[in-house]
Image (cartoon, grey):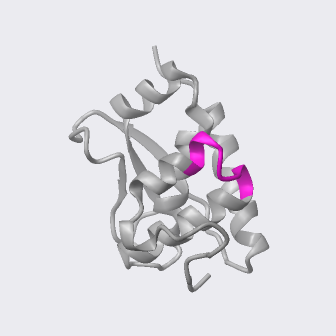
Amino acid sequence: MPIPLITIDIVLEDIKEELKKRGKNVPNVSVSLVDYLPDTVLAYVKAGEYTIYVNRQQYLRAKRAGYEYEYLFVILLHEYLHLIGIADEREVRRIDMEIVEEKFGKESLAYKLAIGLADPRDIREPGLRPHTYI
């Protein structure tokens, strides 16, 4: 039985709105759930494509644990930032953390996920924000 993509579609629309607020041109993308990724790879994009490939097992784990939306927001935003032209991994993680903090707050599970993916050098003292290009 296929997994309904309703939540994925909602998250993608929310991400597009967040990026548009920041003046970014956002292409339409699709999401494909894949089974061949190791647990350490949550998602990826291929150069020249507008598809985000999401690790199905990790996604299902988050869904079963009850934090599907937050999980998808963090990882899809990360890959979306790559698709709009930000190649530097550390910069993408900083921007992801900044947007997630603004949208969900520092006490949210989404922010904790984003912090967990961030480079430790970019986790600042309270009140200080990382410098980003977006």
Q: Residue at x 37, y 66 (%)?
A: 120
- Please provide percent x and percent y for residue 41: 28, 48
Determine whether, in the image, residue 114 is placed left or right of residue 87. right
- Kindly indicate the quadrant of the structure image that contains residue 40: top left
Determine whether, in the image, residue 83 is placed left or right of residue 39. right
- Please provide percent x and percent y for residue 114: 50, 54
Relative to 100, does residue 59 appear above or below in the rendering?
above
- Residue at the far top: name it: 1
- Kindly indicate the quadrant of the structure image that contains residue 82: bottom left
The number of callouts visible is: 0
The stretch of residues the image draws in magenta is 103-111
- Please provide percent x and percent y for residue 30: 52, 50
- Kindly indicate the quadrant of the structure image that contains residue 88: bottom left
Does residue 20 appear anywhere in the picture?
Answer: yes
- Please provide percent x and percent y for residue 104: 70, 50
Does the magenta portion include 110? yes
The quarter of the picture where the N terminus appears is top left
Does residue 30 appear anywhere in the picture?
Answer: no
Q: Residue at x 57, y 30 (%)?
A: 67
Determine whether, in the image, residue 10 is placed left or right of residue 31. right
Relative to 40, does residue 20 appear above or below in the rendering?
below
- Residue at the far front: name it: 125
Query: As rendered, which of 97 and 121 lies closer to the eye?
Result: 121
Q: Residue at x 45, y 66 (%)?
A: 93
The quarter of the picture where the C terminus appears is bottom right
Relative to 80, does residue 63 appear above or below in the rendering?
above
